Amino acid sequence: MGTERDSLTVRARVHAALGEPARLAIVDALCLGDASPGEIAQDLALPTNLVAHHVKVLAEAGLLERTRSEGDRRRTYLRLRPETLELLRPPRLPSAERVVFVCTHNSARSQLAAALWQQRTRRPAASAGTAPAPRVHPKAVAAARRHGLSLDPAGTAHVADVVHDGDLLIAVCDNAHEDLTTGVPRPRLHWSVPDPVRVGTDAAFDAAYTDLAARIDRIAPTVTGDPT
């Protein structure tokens, strides 16, 4: 717990250092290459004394370091420390052999999420429902086809028959998140994705696809382990 608090403190300090437009501009410039404080001042049209102040704050936050020129030893260059920027990424999730997406009927959102996960990450995925429908919703099948995915129209299943030890469970609807309290592991994550079936339009199913795709793109880099 102490290590987690220490990490949050460091991340908060980095965020605070970047919370000033000029300092963020300096970091942006150093992402492309090293520069002297004078070059930074010229490129960003900032007074040199102000650059010196901002550089001091960024250095204290661990975002950059100074190196002496191998040519003119009187000159100092600023170098970004990418490992500090990495701290701003979300914390990594525990390693999971497979991701299982769960919604109530396993007829739309969880099906799209599992297909998306496999397409975007090449990692194993499955879907299930707390009260599975007899078939996948036809508009979910059509939405998947529009976006280059394939769904099995008859491939619904109950969560108790799908989830195994080692799975990362993600509830993609509010009801499933609230219902899964006993019998199977609690969902590790909850995505409150609006139910497209309630609206019933192609646009609603496409909106669910877009929502799920964005969430998967954000979380995928935080999941450790190699695909099987």
Image: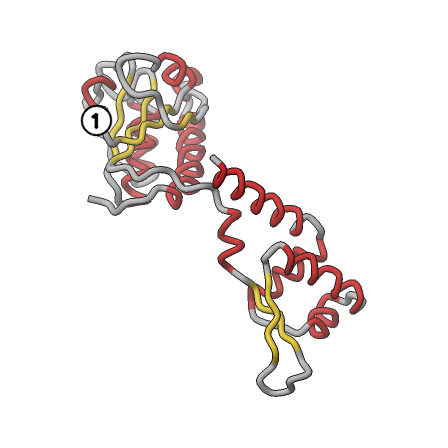
Q: Residue furthest front?
A: 2
Q: Residue at x 77, y 67 (%)?
A: 45
Q: Is residue 41 left or right of residue 184?
A: right
Indicate how the structure is coloured in the image: secondary structure
Where residue 50 appears, as percent x and y from the top left, is 78, 63
Asked whether 97 or 199 is in front, the reply is 97
Asked whether 56 or 40 is in front, the reply is 56
Query: Mark 1: few, some, or many residues within 10 Å (few <14, many ≥20)?
Result: some
Q: Is residue 213 left or right of residue 77?
A: left
Q: How many numbered marks does the figure carry?
A: 1
Q: Which quadrant is the C terminus positioned in?
A: top left
Position of 140 relative to 73 (above/below): above
Where residue 95 appears, as percent x and y from the top left, is 30, 39
* SS at circle 1: loop
The three-letter amino acid code for the residue at tag 1 is His
Where residue 68 appears, as percent x and y from the top left, is 61, 78
Which residue in the protein does label 1 denote?
164
Q: Residue at x 41, y 21 (%)?
A: 196
Asked whether 66 or 223 is in front, the reply is 66
Position of 6 relative to 205 (above/below): below
